[in-house]
Amino acid sequence: MSGRRDVIDLDEGGREPAETANVVPDGHPSGRRRKAQLVAALLAGMVLGGVGVDELRDARDERQRNASVSLVAFPASGGGGGSDVAGVLQMDALLAVVNAGPAPITLRAVTGRGPGVVLRDTGQSRLVRPGGVGWIDVKLRLECATAFGSEPLPVRLSVETADRRTREVTYPVAVRDSVWHRGAEVPCEHLR
């Protein structure tokens, strides 16, 4: 054996393997730019998604507000009247309806029936803004002997909400010791 040894130079500068020739190292400016673009796109997507969710939530809340109905009703005025049957008084009166809800409503119909009392509206619709009062003309038929018991009169109100849907609401109206009761006392005395 001759003493010759082959030496392999492992430090060949400037030559890269063929598989890695097109890979950009992490520290290279174009690699950072791609990462920044990717992060910016991700953030933009999150922001737009958040805005979309907020818009959907706001739209849902608006629909719920427009569909909700909260009313208070009470006798507002009434008196006099006449009779075509002994012991029964027919009287024109007003029913006050307060819109305690968050959106405007339109009162379409009002009816009520209880012991000795029948109530119906005169067919006129009323727009009532939030916090506003609608004065509804009603016709009362009162049986003088039984109309003013202790139970409230269940009044059914047909209401069109801001979403254009009709809803039925029942509200107990106290008739005993109301302006209707006081307005019917004298005429009822004459009918007995």
Image: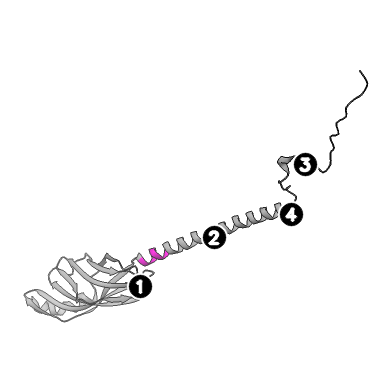
Task: For residue 135, say whether it is visible.
Answer: yes
Residue 29 circle label: 4
Q: Amino acid at mark 3?
A: Glu
Q: Quadrant of the N terminus?
A: top right
- Disc 2 marks a residue whose amino acid type is Leu
Q: Position of residue 46 (x, y in %)?
A: 56, 56
Callout 2: few (<14), some (14-19), or many (20+) C-alpha neighbours within 10 Å? few
Write the residue at 23% across / 71% down: 109
As for residue 183 lying within the magenta part, the answer is no
Q: Nearer the viewer, mark 4 or mark 3?
A: 3
Q: Report the residue marked by disc 1.
A: 104
Does 126 sit left or right of 191 as displayed? right
- C-alpha gap between disc 2 and disc 3: 44 Å
In the displayed structure, 70 sits above or below 96; it is above
Q: Magenta residues, as a range? A: 61-66
Q: Select label 1 or label 3 by which is in front.
A: 3
Which residue is rendered at x = 71% and y = 40% of the image? 19
Query: Which image quarter: residue 186?
Result: bottom left
Extreme top residue here? 1
- Number of numbered discs on residues: 4
Which one is earlier in the sequence, the residue at label 4 or at label 3?
3
Label 1, label 3: how many angstroms apart (C-alpha)?
Answer: 77 Å
Q: Residue 192: where, in percent of width, then height?
A: 8, 75
Q: Secondary structure at mark 4?
A: helix
Q: Decide: marks 2, 4 in contact (CB < 8 A)?
A: no
Instruction: Identify which residue, 43 or 60, lies in the foreground.
Output: 43
Looking at the rendered structure, which numbered label has been put on residue 48? 2
Q: Residue beneath label 3, please?
A: 16
Q: How packed is label 1: few (under 14 Cα within 10 Å), some, or many (20 or more)?
A: many
The image's mark for residue 74 is none
Q: CA distance from mark 2 to mark 4?
A: 28 Å
- Badge 1 or badge 4: first in the primary sequence: 4
